[in-house]
Image (tube, rainbow, N blue to C red):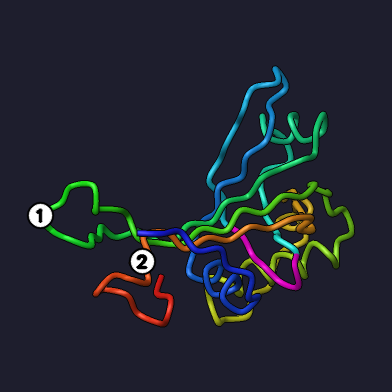
Amino acid sequence: MITVTIEERHLIEDIIAKNTICYVGMTDKEGLPYVIPMNFGYQDDIIYLHSAQQGSSIEALNINPNVCITFCTESTLTYQNKEVACSYRMKGASVICRGKVVFEEDFQEKVKALDIIMKHYSSRSFTYSDPAVNNVRIWKVEIDSISTKVFGVPHPNSRNYKDKLEF
């Protein structure tokens, strides 16, 4: 089995679109790793997140806005030879993005961000009350770097090899 690096933008966006949550890694105020699962929206190389106005993550991001956001498709167990233990591997795909969180304060921009987030989960249109928009913290993360891998791919010399990547 091999791991394949993906650079095609449409494949990267397919992997992101298949996810319902992402994992956001940051450094807490004590300098320790801190990772939380979050709902998200994605559009034009920007990841949008939302949270309460205050909390551990907000405190951490006020000190250091750098984040690492990970998406991973649901993985399945695969193998090249069912009799050989070391030929077993999980098959799936992951996207790892790095960037800086900027908190959006403009009311209309917050509404746009909420629409992008909700569009990821529903085809409906939504309206938001003023208190709801004012009380939510919108995180905007422009992607500075991205790496994408598909893992558990049969080796090209394997009888299980397919010319098309599946994840």
Query: In which quadrant is the N terminus drawn?
Result: bottom left
Q: Identify the image quadrant of residue 163.
A: bottom left
Q: Nearer the viewer, residue 44 or 136?
A: 44
Q: Position of residue 106 (x, y in %)?
A: 89, 59
Residue in the image at 32% along x and 54% along y: 90
Extreme residue toward the front, this view: 157
Residue in the image at 57% along x and 81% along y: 124
Extreme residue toward the right, this view: 106
Gap in angstroms between the C-alphas marked 1 and 2: 17 Å
Q: Identify the image quadrant of residue 28.
A: top right
Dot 2 corresponds to which residue?
155
Dot 1 corresponds to which residue?
83
Q: Is residue 40 left or right of residue 106?
A: left
Q: Is residue 156 left or right of residue 145?
A: left
Q: Amino acid at mark 2?
A: His
Q: Amino acid at mark 1?
A: Glu
Q: Position of residue 70 (x, y in %)?
A: 57, 51
Tell me the crowding category of disc 2: few under 14, some 14 to 19, or many 20 or more residues within 10 angstroms, Cα based.
Answer: some
Q: Position of residue 145 (x, y in %)?
A: 74, 55
Query: In which quadrant is the C terminus drawn?
Result: bottom left
